[in-house]
């Protein structure tokens, strides 16, 4: 069952719903940033004892180019789906190395105009 996603911005809502199953079931999904250029932030915490490897807060910050946010609403349904799939592919490349205490637990995905390409 898909978790409910409550976001104001239509582009972030669509993309979040496309990505949500890639993240742990307890992940929080939020809209952050300015209204003109909102970002999507997905965060969760891995289990474990505080101050020990494994108990780490993780996050992915999706930064959207303003041109993507402006163009997306005018796209056809199929084109919107392709944009979401491209962001999903970018997300699959992220490396969440839970076993490495020195792993980066904050990852950034820049969603630029390339996702709009036909």
Image: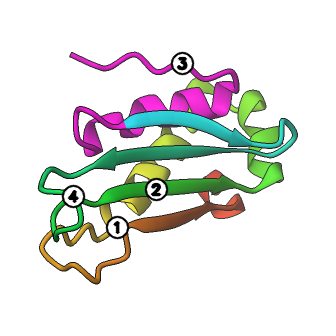
C-alpha distance separating marks 1 and 3: 24 Å
C-alpha distance separating marks 2 and 3: 17 Å
Vertical placement of residue 39 versus 55, above or below: above
Residue occupying image coordinates x 17% and y 69%: 52
Pointer 1 or 3: first along the chain: 3
Residue 37 is a magenta residue: no
Are there few (<14), some (14-19), or many (20+) residues within 10 Å of tag 2? some
C-alpha distance separating marks 4 and 2: 21 Å
Q: Which corner quadrant of the image does residue 30 belong to?
A: top right
Q: Is residue 87 left or right of residue 50?
A: right
Asked whether the viewer can see residue 55, the reply is: yes
Question: Bounds of the magenta span?
Answer: 1-27
* Residue wearing tag 2: 60
From the image, state whether disc 1 or disc 2 is nearer to you.
2
* Contact flag, marks 1 and 2 (Cβ < 8 Å): yes
Instruction: Give the image location of residue 5, x and y in percent.
Output: 46, 21
Residue occupying image coordinates x 32% and y 20%: 3
Pointer 2 or 3: first along the chain: 3
Number of the label disc, if any, that sits on residue 50 = 4
């Amino acid at each position: 069952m898909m978790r409910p996603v409550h976001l104001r911005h239509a582009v972030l809502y669509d993309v979040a719903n496309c990505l949500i199953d890639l993240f742990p079931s307890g992940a929080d999904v939020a809209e952050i940033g300015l209204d003109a250029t909102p970002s999507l932030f997905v965060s969760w915490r891995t289990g474990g004892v505080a101050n020990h490897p494994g108990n780490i807060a993780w996050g992915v910050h999706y930064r959207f180019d303003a041109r993507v946010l402006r163009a997306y609403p005018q796209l056809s349904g199929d084109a919107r789906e392709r944009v979401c799939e491209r962001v999903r592919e970018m997300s699959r490349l992220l490396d969440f190395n839970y076993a490495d205490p020195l792993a980066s637990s904050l990852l950034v995905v820049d969603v630029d105009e390339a996702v709009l390409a036909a």
